[in-house]
Image (tube, rainbow, N blue to C red):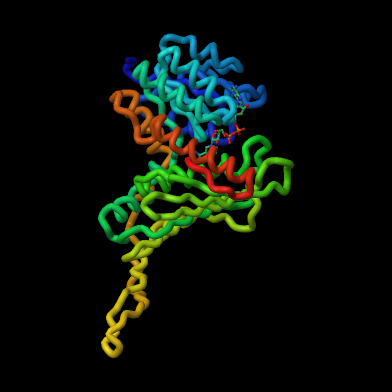
Amino acid sequence: MNERTKLVQIGVGAWGRNLLRNFSLLPDVEVVGLCDKSEETREGLKKQFPALPVTADYRKLLDNLEVDAVVIATPPAHHYKIAKEALSLGKDVFVEKPMTLAISEAEELVRLAEGSRRILMVGHIMEYHPAVVRMREYIEGGELGDIYYVYSTRVNLGKVRDVENALWSFAPHDISMIIYLLREKPAAVSATGAAYLRKGIEDVSFITLFFDSGTIAHIHTSWLDPHKVRRLTIVGSKKMAVLDDVEPQEKIRIYDKGVNLQQAYDTYGEYLSLRTGDILIPAVKVQEPLKIECQEFIKAVRSRIPPITDGKDGLAVLRVLRAADKSMKENGTPHKC
Ligand SMILES: NC(=O)c1ccc[n+]([C@@H]2O[C@H](COP(=O)([O-])OP(=O)(O)OC[C@H]3O[C@@H](n4cnc5c(N)ncnc54)[C@H](O)[C@@H]3O)[C@@H](O)[C@H]2O)c1
């Protein structure tokens, strides 16, 4: 192990730039090479990092025996091939979401990482979000009671992708967050969606997750919407909670609202009474989730302890995406995950 983790990054596009910024700022990391297929991007990187090798061929970076860790932020169709080569050459790997496109590919990466004792981490950023972590503490502390249902909205008027649809592009965030919060994987999923702008690439998706515990979760994703919304609502038997990620400070609100079952003294029957109490806005430390995610990868590389968003977590999310994709093609027929 090098004194500082020697890291290379493959894919430095819109999101990759953010990863690079964060990794470059970590004190125990030395970025030793960059790769991008686009000549324009490479020219920009060479100006910004004149001392670094910048290449179009990622193999040149992987062949460097000095390299400890590889960050992959290419479009998802390239994740599997690059991650497989990097793991095979003994590198630790951070791969953006979705981990791969096929379940068999993700299973192979998990096997490969386990067999060679390499770190394989997937960029499920919401699991590092301080407000999401706090929300799980509320759920686990019993504050909300039994979780009845959850719904998440991730919509805006934004980048229209030409390969992956709004399900594959956005829903990994919500699926990983909901599995993390509930500590339960969905048993089945039903999804519908529609493509308006480009043939065969759904701009909007509506996904319902069914859990064996009885909880249901709904996810709405779209890049064709008048509002920018990043909101998760959790309805529990005791209280209700909202996580609004567009809010700069007050990201969580816990509502002491619910419905109580009361004895009716006059009829000896039962009736339901509404309860509307206080609203709690807990203080959540404002920290960039991406910075925490990057730190966790380096911590895993240096400690050899797998991160929470390891390959198995990536695989769990992929199973849901695949089942949702099948369901969407069949107008919502439920599929097991
Ligand atoms: N965690 C998040 O919040 C978040 C947000 C946006 C995107 N992402 C993920 O990040 C990844 C990249 O998304 P993006 O928005 O930056 O896409 P992008 O298209 O802007 O960038 C991808 C870059 O990869 C390069 N590239 C493509 N194939 C390559 C190859 N074989 N070798 C080297 N470079 C290659 C392209 O030239 C491009 O510069 C995707 O997996 C996406 O899902 C994550």
For the N terminus, the image quarter is: top left
Q: Tell me which residue sits at (54%, 55%) in the image.
A: 229
Rendered view: 187 above or below 270: above
x and y percentages locating residue 53 in the rendered image: 53, 15
> In front here: 213 or 283?
213
Q: Is residue 248 visible?
A: no
Q: Quadrant of ligand 1?
A: top right
Quarter of image, res 114: top left
Q: Tell me which residue sits at (57%, 30%) in the image.
A: 76
> In front here: 209 or 20?
209
**Residue furthest front as drawn:** 268
Q: Is residue 81 visible?
A: yes
Quarter of image, res 316: top left
x and y percentages locating residue 123 in the rendered image: 45, 35
Q: Is residue 253 left or right of residue 162?
A: left
Q: Tell me which residue sits at (32%, 17%) in the image.
A: 3
Rendered view: 83 above or below 262: above
Quarter of image, res 159: top right
x and y percentages locating residue 94 in the rendered image: 44, 27
Rendered view: 213 above or below 1: below
Q: How many marks?
A: 0
x and y percentages locating residue 65 in the rendered image: 43, 9
Q: Tell me which residue sits at (53%, 20%) in the image.
A: 82
> In front here: 27 or 250?
250
Q: Is residue 267 left or right of residue 97?
A: left
